[in-house]
Image: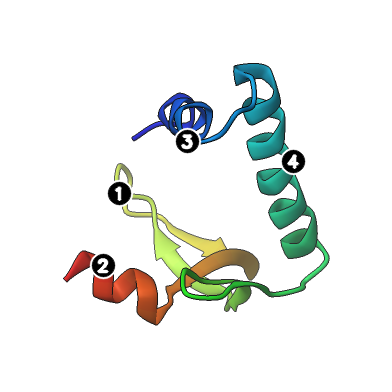
């Protein structure tokens, strides 16, 4: 399923235009991104929680040359599915 498929589903289930549905989805995704960039958690009850996690610095290898490289610490987004989503997928 793509972003356009989600927009189409919103249009079919509501009385709003495709443009409005696209703007609504973009707003939701933008707000989730903004909250995560501030380090905040985003919880959608019954669906899941988006969190920011810190990955420690580590040493890796260049697969082409075998040379050791340092991989810096970084923040990454994580998603933990909620009970409603887990039950729906079962």
Residue visible at 38% across and 51% down in the picture: 62
Q: Nearer the viewer, mark 1 or mark 4?
A: 4
Q: Residue furthest left?
A: 90
C-alpha gap between disc 3 and disc 2: 20 Å
**84 sits left or right of 55 in the view:** left
Q: Which secondary structure, mark 4?
A: helix
Rendered location of residue 79, percent (x, y) = 49, 68
Q: Which mark is residue 8?
A: none
**Are dots 1 and 2 in contact, CB under 8 Å?**
no
C-alpha gap between disc 3 and disc 1: 49 Å
Q: Which residue is identified by label 3?
A: 13
Q: Nearer the viewer, mark 3 or mark 1?
A: 3
C-alpha gap between disc 4 and disc 2: 26 Å
Q: Is 9 or 30 nearer to us in this picture?
A: 9
Rendered location of residue 5, percent (x, y) = 41, 28
Q: Which secondary structure, mark 3?
A: helix
In primary-sequence order, the first of circles 4 and 2 is 4
């Amino acid at each position: 399923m793509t972003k356009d498929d989600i927009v189409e589903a919103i249009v079919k289930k509501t009385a709003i235009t495709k443009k409005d549905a696209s703007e609504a989805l973009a707003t939701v995704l933008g707000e989730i991104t903004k909250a995560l960039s501030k380090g905040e958690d985003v919880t959608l009850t019954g669906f899941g929680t988006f969190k920011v996690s810190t990955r420690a610095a580590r040493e890796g290898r260049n697969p082409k040359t075998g040379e050791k490289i340092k991989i810096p610490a970084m923040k990454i987004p994580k998603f933990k599915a909620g009970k409603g989503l887990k039950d729906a997928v079962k």
